[in-house]
Image (cartoon, helix red, strand yellow):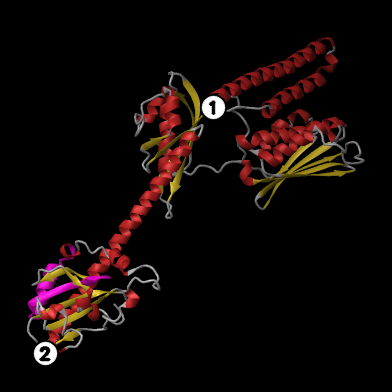
Amino acid sequence: MAALVPGLRPFMNSADDLPPSRAEILDAHDLDGVADEAGFDELTSFTAALCEAPICLVSVVGETMQRFVAKHGLDVTETPLESSFCAHAMLGSDLMVVPDATRDPRFAENPLVTGDPFIRFYAGAPLVTEDGFPLGSLCVIDRVPRPGLTPLQQQGLRVMASQVVSAMGHRKKTKVQLASEAVAKQALSETEQKFRILADTMPQMVWSTLPDGHHDYYNARWYEFTGVPEGSTDGEGWNGMFHPDDQDKAWERWRHSLRTGEPYEIEYRLRDAEGNFRWTLGRALPIRDAEGNIIRWFGTCTDIHEQKLLMEQREMISQELSHRIKNIFSVINGLIGLSTRTHPELKGLADELRSRIMSLGKAHDFVRPHSARSRPTSMQATLTGLLEQLLSAYQSEAQRIRIRGGDFRIDDRSATPLALSFHELATNAAKYGALSTLDGHVAVDISEAGDDVVIAWTESGGPQVKSAPTAEGFGSRLIALSMTNQLGGKLSYDWKPEGLRAVAMIPKTSMSRPAPQRT
């Protein structure tokens, strides 16, 4: 073949060539039907008329044959490569013109010259891709010799050839794009299948929605738990599965998440396959694209019914214990009152003692475990207010505890660990420290340092401190748990001879949630 068409070998598929082969490259251009789609029939007719030639061909050179993907004035669709004029023309840098094929040694004995269609004149423009690969040529043929083409005809043949190359390149890109889309679709299908298998093996109910919140997928666990027919809860049908008292709340929370993109989390009662309502924790997170747009929501429903019942039982026991403890405070106050009737000279002392016991009762409301229902509605909203109420049991006319400095807003998350910590410090001071003597005092100084709130607890006037405790008691562990784990802060102790100095550094963000923005 190299002898027939010098220079063609590098584009042919042989043992020393690198892939892809010529056949693969031509196949990538998806030439089937290209003539009809690209309007090549009109192009060849126009080119033939422009060049005043009876025949015009769009020829693509293969490995053994040349194929006419568009033609005018010729019925043949392909010819052997050995007789191809275009295999020569496509290797040139410009038009190849053969004025009289019978006088050209390359073509004088060519079957297409000695026989039908009796080629005499040939002019071909190479069809070369952007990356330099020769596909074939756009040629015009005449059955009589001609000296050549006019300048206008030459320019027209080049322009028409560039149109053919452009159309073929578009077909290639389209085919590659379709192939890529098919591969991507297949990969997506496999990924979705893997996701469904994974989701069906999870103990939780799994669901997903479109960006607008339309539910379009539930895993097998959902249908097993609810017992509803597959597809019956698509769209907005899911809300009907909730307890009537929970439906409005669930809808409101879900719409808020769709509107803001914030994670969805809520507890509601979900109807199971037997018609019973069970407490369930619903959660969902948005999936975003590279631009930050939500493309899907994925969510889970977790059965927490037993856990919820256990928490309610614990809450009931906690309330009962708290009620009994407060009753003990009331009984003690009653006993003190009875004692003052027989010893009226102790009335002043008794009144002060009863006041302190009542303050201890108030402190108990802060430090005992609370649920959302049992949390005091009158809980202090500032740090100073909390400390004043909490430590009032240890005060006297001499103001043995002084709270100084700034003040900071607190909320329900920080109030309990703060109350536990300072109640424990006050209790220890009353047992062993400054508050265990008549002359002892405590200074509580509140300040800020950068992003932290600093609370310094300084005791003075109590028993002399000889050394730091050698063993960590329950109270110390309780303070560490509250300060470090719950508030994310730090607490340091300095056991000075004149009294303990404890300094707590708590992030401002742990003291209270940001105030909601009004819209």
For marks 1 and 2, the one nearer the N-term is 2
Residue 173 vertical position relative to residue 132 in the rendered view, above or below: above
Q: Which mark is residue 304?
A: 1
Q: Is residue 262 above or below residue 281?
A: below
Q: Position of residue 240 (x, y in %)?
A: 38, 26
| Alpha-carbon span between mark 1 and mark 2 | 94 Å
Quadrant of the rendered structure where residue 246 is?
top left
Which region shows up in magenta? 37-65
| Residue contact between numbered discs 1 and 2, judged by CB atoms under 8 Å | no
- Residue 249, visible in the rendered structure: no
Secondary element type, mark 2: loop
Closer-to-camera residue (407/413)? 413
Identify the image quadrant of residue 237. Answer: top left
Q: Nearer the viewer, residue 4 or 321?
A: 4
Going by the numbered disc 1, the residue's amino acid type is Ile
Residue 3, image x and y in percent? 29, 81
* Residue 101 point in image, percent of width and height: 14, 85
Q: Is residue 330 magenta?
A: no
The residue singled out by tag 2 in the image is 147
Question: In the rendered structure, which amino acid carries the disc numbered 2?
Answer: Pro
In the shown orientation, is residue 173 left or right of residue 389? Answer: left
Q: Is residue 92 left or right of residue 306?
A: left
Q: 1 or 399: which is nearer to us?
A: 1
Verify whether residue 58 appears in magenta.
yes
Q: Residues within 10 Å of mark 2 (few under 14, many from 20)?
A: few
Viewer-proximal residue, 138 or 319? 138
